[in-house]
Image (spheres, helix red, strand yellow):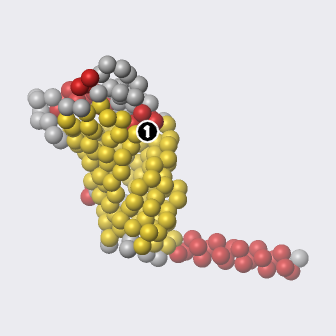
Amino acid sequence: MKNLKTIAIALLLAFTATNINAQTKKVDAAASKLTWVGKKVTGQHEGTVNLKEGSLVFKGKKLVGGNFVVDMKTIAVTDLKAGQGKEKLEGHLNSEDFFGIEKFQTANLVFKTIADKGNNVYAVTADLTIKGKTNAVTFNVAVNGNKATTNFKVDRTKYDIKYGSGSFFDNLGDKAISDDFELAIELAF
């Protein structure tokens, strides 16, 4: 019985010490920037989408976790001007053909595993949820002071976004849209 109490106390202390060392840092959504690029045969479009909320978890100076909510209602096209196709493309991105914003107003990213690559760079595997579908994505995150940055590609077809995909439709010609879109993320915390 004495050994069981000793083990229980040791586990409690270890758990408490682990939690004390972990520090959650809230991401400043307004100071953070998420940009996207979608490519097609005849060119590309780019834009922004806003972070709704997020946090990074550190043990000492080491990144050990993170989770984020993206406000999909804020998706914006930045390479077209008002009255020159901007509103039309934004409306299409909001539609069921793409992100289905009326039903799916947020996207989520939750870090699952993190490996320290040295020099404040971390290899992350995370669950990305878009349109209610969750898939694993992998990317590197660089942490420098109170900023973290990453770039990675997302295969939109894994989230049931198949519009204009040559992987699912024949004879698209120059109307084909790449299955991948690129994200560049700068987080301030």
Could you say which quadrant of the image residue 90 lies in? top left
- Measuring from the top left, give residue 120's x and y in whole percent: 38, 71
The reply, left or right, for residue 80 in relation to residue 161 is left
| Residue 189 appears in the figure | no
Q: Position of residue 109 (x, y in %)?
A: 44, 49
Q: Is residue 42 visible?
A: yes
Q: Position of residue 182 (x, y in %)?
A: 31, 45
Which three-letter amino acid code belongs to the residue tagged 1? Ile
Residue 22 appears at what percent x and percent y? 51, 71
In the displayed structure image, the side of residue 33 where residue 169 appears, left or right:
right
Q: Residue at x 49, y 55 (%)?
A: 125
Query: Badge 1 is on which residue?
Result: 130
Query: Residue at the spot x=36%, y=46% of the render?
Result: 153
Residue at position x 49%, y 65% in the image: 115
Q: Between residue 123 and residue 53, name the one nearer to us.
A: 123
174 or 39: nearer the viewer: 174
Q: 84 or 175, which lies in front? A: 175
Which image quadrant for residue 89? top left
At a point 39% along the width and 36% down the height, the residue shown is 156
Q: Is residue 27 above or below residue 9?
A: above
In which quadrant will I find the C terminus?
bottom left
Q: Quadrant of the N terminus?
A: bottom right
Determine the image quadrant of residue 72.
top left
Q: Is residue 35 above or below residue 39?
A: below
Q: Is residue 23 above or below residue 40?
A: below
